[in-house]
Image (cartoon, helix red, strand yellow):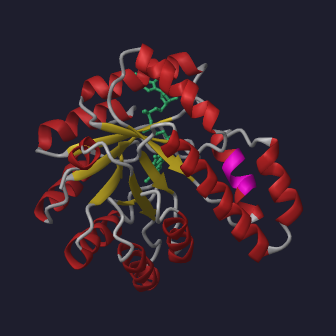
Amino acid sequence: LKIREILAVGKPTLSFEVFPPKTEDAYDSVEKAAAKIAKLKPSFMSVTYGAGGGTSDYTVGIASAIKEEYGVTPLAHLTCVSSTREKVHHVLGELKERGIENVLALRGDIPQDGSTPKEYHYASELIREIKKAGDFCIGAACYPEGHVESANKSVDMDYLKQKVEAGCDFVTTQMFFDNSILYSYLYRIREKGIQVPVIAGIMPVTNAKQIRRITQMSGTCLPSRFMSIVDRFGDNPAAMKQAGIAYATDQIIDLIANGVNGIHVYSMNKPDVAMKIKENLSEIL
Ligand code: FAD
């Protein structure tokens, strides 16, 4: 099934994300976690792509297991900045062979080792290429608070428009912890003529260590209501987990109540977190 068809139904959707293992030893444990999440019957499941592309086989393998063994629609991520065209086409060939129809087309982070982009500079180039390579449903990333490298939000939205014009069918947001940021972003991108479905990316923060990484990587704003939770419960893992899941649930309910139907949870290979969120929404979805 193509994700654009799932979204076109117009009902709330709940999807989960997993990341592939970094080494073969961890493959089984990731597959088991993915299996437990798949058993929750999400609308689809995304599988991220390791930064350098060295673990691309694992992304394809986990995405394929999600589809074949659990009957859940997979979305395989693919990044291009550290890749050659040949590698990109190899991965697309593998996806086609396994009947995986959905690809999230990303640039990827610029490597920190000083190497310069090889053949691709922006996700829009990858989108154009995937479009030509076959009948894929293509997603892309978007940043309600602006991408960290962007001079300002407006320029970032212009480049988002280029991705949509290149052929992407939907976009998934970077995580955010203040829904009002998403609502004003939606207003602004619609004004710019970007009409594709926007899936809201929600990160349940279940341990205090995650916060430092999140703010360093993405510059995401942390509202005081959220920070109070971390200040109060950050040293108590069980309490932090419960409060983090409750905060994410609250965000999701507010989004759905305000007509944002696509909800994607950054579930980070944690079936218990995915399960709790699904349970918290049992009467809402
Ligand atoms: P782009 O859309 O190419 O944008 C990158 C920057 O370039 C932005 O600042 C943009 O404004 C600017 N820009 C775009 N086009 C132009 C142009 N023509 N001229 C000048 N500037 C331009 N990373 C992974 O490694 N693996 C994953 O699986 C992964 N999954 C992700 C999923 C989601 C939903 C999100 C939000 C991010 C994900 N990332 C992943 C992180 C992502 O790779 C980084 O945020 C990366 O820095 C940008 O990728 P992009 O596809 O948004 O890039």
> Could you tell whether 6 is left or right of 77 in the image?
left
Residue 147 drawn above or below residue 111 = above
Magenta stretch: dominant secondary structure:
helix
Residue 81 visible in the current orientation: yes
x, y (%) of residue 30?
Answer: 44, 78
Q: Quadrant of the N terminus?
A: bottom left
Q: Quadrant of residue 38?
A: bottom left
> Could you tell whether 67 is left or right of 153 in the image?
left
Residue 112 lies within the magenta run: no
Q: Nearer the viewer, residue 244 or 149?
A: 244
Q: Quadrant of residue 151?
A: top right
- Residues rendered magenta in the picture: 211-215
x, y (%) of residue 217?
Answer: 64, 46
Residue located 59% across and 57% down the image: 249
Residue 49 visible in the current orientation: no
Residue located 56% across and 33% down the image: 182
Residue 90 drawn above or below residue 109 = below
Q: Residue most toward the front?
A: 283
Residue 24 drawn above or below residue 45 = below
Q: Nearer the viewer, residue 67 or 251?
A: 251
Residue located 70% across and 69% down the image: 241
x, y (%) of residue 246?
Answer: 66, 61
> Could you tell whether 199 is left or right of 95 in the image?
right
Residue located 41% across and 80% down the image: 36
x, y (%) of residue 34?
Answer: 40, 75
Q: Nearer the viewer, residue 147 or 194?
A: 194
In this rendering, the count of numbered labels is: 0
Q: Quadrant of the C terminus?
A: bottom left
